Amino acid sequence: MLARKYRFTHRLNEDFFKSTQRLFSRQFVLFYRKSANESSSAQLAIIIPAKVAKTAVLRNKARRVIGEEIKTILPSLAGYEMALYLQSKLENPHEAHQLLSKLTRS
């Protein structure tokens, strides 16, 4: 589970998704934008639709696995608001880490 300071606490509405840039991988789409307060820590929402994982147990397990995979890179992403959207069944959670590391390079 993500630490509280890294959780995206605002409501994810249409305005957030319209105002973001995107990075794509085979399993994930990363929506991101610079935070209004650039000194704040990175904030991340992990979105797993019911079409991908039918039960809440599977969705929560996938969130935990993804969160553990990416928690080492989150401190280097300070000043970003992000939403990580899982498009297909979770096969390689390391792909989320690779996608976020592309963001640190740009």
Image (tube, rainbow, N blue to C red):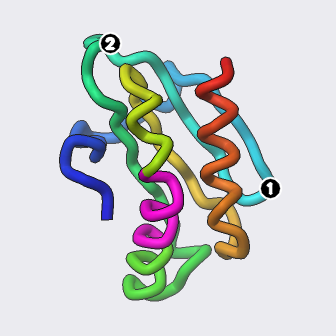
User: On the image, numbered disc 1 is attached to which residue?
Assistant: 26
Kind of residue indicated by mark 1: Arg
Give the extent of the magenta segment: 63-71
At numbered mark 2, what does the secondary structure look like: helix, strand or loop? loop
Q: From the viewer's perspective, is residue 97 above or below residue 37?
A: below
Kind of residue indicated by mark 2: Glu
Quadrant placement of the C terminus = top right
Q: From the viewer's perspective, is residue 87 above or below residue 40?
A: below
Question: Which SS type dominates the magenta stretch?
Answer: helix
Q: From the viewer's perspective, is residue 104 above or below residue 89?
A: above
Give residue 38's mark: 2
Q: Nearer the viewer, residue 23 or 53?
A: 23
Q: From the viewer's perspective, is residue 99 above or below residue 39?
A: below
Q: Position of residue 7 (x, y in %)?
A: 28, 46
Q: Residue placed at 27% from the left, 14% from the top?
A: 39
Q: Residue placed at 21% from the left, 42% from the top?
A: 5
Q: Residue placed at 55% from the left, 35% from the top?
A: 31
Mark 1 closeness class: few <14, some 14–19, many ≥20 residues within 10 Å: few
Q: Is residue 70 magenta?
A: yes
At numbered mark 1, what does the secondary structure look like: helix, strand or loop? loop
Quadrant placement of the N terminus = bottom left
> In the drawing, does residue 87 fall left or right of residue 15?
right
Q: Position of residue 70 (x, y in %)?
A: 50, 53
Q: Quadrant of residue 74?
A: top left
